[in-house]
Amino acid sequence: MSLKSFGAKIFAKNIRKKIDKWASKPEATQKKIFQELIEKAKDTKFGKDHDFKNIKSYADFSKKVPVRDYEELRFYVDKMVAGEEDVLWPGKPLYYAKTSGTTSGAKYIPLTKDSMPSHINAARNAILCYIAETGNAKFVDGKMIFLQGSPEMEEKNGVKLGRLSGIVAHYVPSYLQKNRMPSWETNCIDDWETKVDAIVEETRNENMSVISGIPSWVQMYFEKLQQKTGKKVGELFPNFDLFIYGGVNYEPYRSKFENLIGRKVDSIELYPASEGFFAFQDKQTEKGMLLQLDSGMFYEFIKADEFFDENPKRLTVGEVEMGVNYVMLVSSNAGLWAYNIGDTVQFRSTNPYRVMVSGRIKHFISAFGEHVIAKEVEEAMQEATAATMARISEFTVAPQITPKNEELPYHEWFIEFEKEPEDLAKFSKTLDESLQKQNSYYFDLIEGKILQPLKISRVPENGFQQYMKSIGKLGGQNKLPRLANDRKIAEVLEKIIKA
């Protein structure tokens, strides 16, 4: 055992004890965070506008601070970006994480001196929890890669801005610098396909032990490795035994990954976002990710099916139930207040609090009142692939409201198969029955002959990559929506299918 892996095991035990301490006192931990946030921000512009000096309880806060998304908070963000200090949080931010907004163009999410450590520590702690649980620390001696955006940054009125993953790249600890791949120069390549080719060349002969990134883009890296070398990833990298991912559900990709690797490897799920690093998988034996209750973020939750009501009830962590779909709100030491991050979550455990991401509040299909969410289509896909030995590269779902020949409307599943199902009819039937089983509204619409069972449209090889490239979102942290309530994506995919 190397000195580095021995030290990692000792460090892991200490961190695990600290995590268990706050996780065992969730409500007290969140109350402490809440009070610290209010106290520190009371003299900011936002704090004065919302009378923070007279907020003595969560009840006061929920009355004085409305739920906002980026557009509704933009008045304050624009002041910060223009160079003003003490707007949402004391002083100026350290960085802005620049993301693409769907309605507002670029979005600038502040990262502060107080919030930045949580982004770094959460990723580190996820790995340390894995070491504490499994005793496996030998991977720290191998090479590690995180497929991420460019670390190059711009500057706006004295504050640097860039992609979150690129900003985080500047904080890789010194003891990991020698293990880190790819090189700085390769990481700065902007074109994603050129970048992946360069990463393949840099890593193909290295002792890779940890690989991390969004599954769809890691899949592209694995495929190019196999094309270049003619070997399975696990054969090429015999010491590769840990895959770290976030951004999307891994399960629809798992069988394809295991085929590309040639064996099973352990995995750790992360829940990072520009707005905060919210959760990570802390146990291999448990489903869900441990909600980061002691990381400068105060959480609120609104039931997803009540979210668009006039005055939906806002809940704290002590009031949530397992299995319910919630919109998650965050107030943080980055200066976000009752901020709707756009994600929906479900609790898989309340002792301790573990969540899974169930979708996006704006990404659903309810063209006929069915309100189908991402979690449901992903679980249906898992059942169908397992039942028919199929492997998929990517998929998305859209409603077909006005089909030809006066037939009933239906849900159209656009699927790129890596391995066709043994029986396509059985695959389609399993998908539909699983969705009916999970969603009673969808079941009623099928039973009542308002909808006909779903239909599958095969997308050609690399068709989804073509789609992402066509909208300028190939690679990096960009993700394909699992489903949409319109046919904007479907219309582009139809052209790719016909080409």
Image: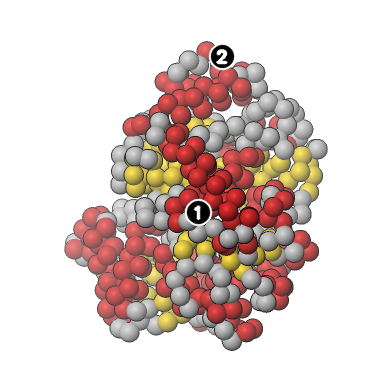
Element type where label 2 sits in the image? helix
Q: Nearer the viewer, residue 48 or 212?
A: 212
Question: What mark, if any, has residue 131 been given in the picture?
Answer: 1
Residue sticking out furthest to the left: 447
Residue sticking out furthest to the top: 54
* Residue at 47% over, 22% down: 61
Q: Is residue 297 left or right of residue 327?
A: right
* Mark 2 Cα-neighbour bin, 10 Å: few <14, some 14–19, many ≥20: few
Residue for badge 2: 53
Question: What mark, if any, has residue 74 been given in the picture?
Answer: none
Residue 135, given in percent of the width and then of the height, sits at 48, 56
Instruction: Pick the quarter of the image with the N terminus.
Output: bottom right
- Coloring basis for residues: secondary structure
Q: Tag 2: residue type?
A: Lys
Residue sticking out furthest to the bottom: 230
Q: State the image quarter where residue 476 is shown.
A: bottom right
Q: Tag 1: residue type?
A: Ile
Residue 165, given in percent of the width and then of the height, sits at 65, 53
Q: Nearer the viewer, residue 402 or 166?
A: 166
* Residue at 50% over, 81% down: 460
Please determine whether, in this image, residue 337 is positioned above or below residue 122: above
Please determine whether, in this image, residue 157 is positioned above or below residue 444: above
* Mark 1 Cα-neighbour bin, 10 Å: few <14, some 14–19, many ≥20: many
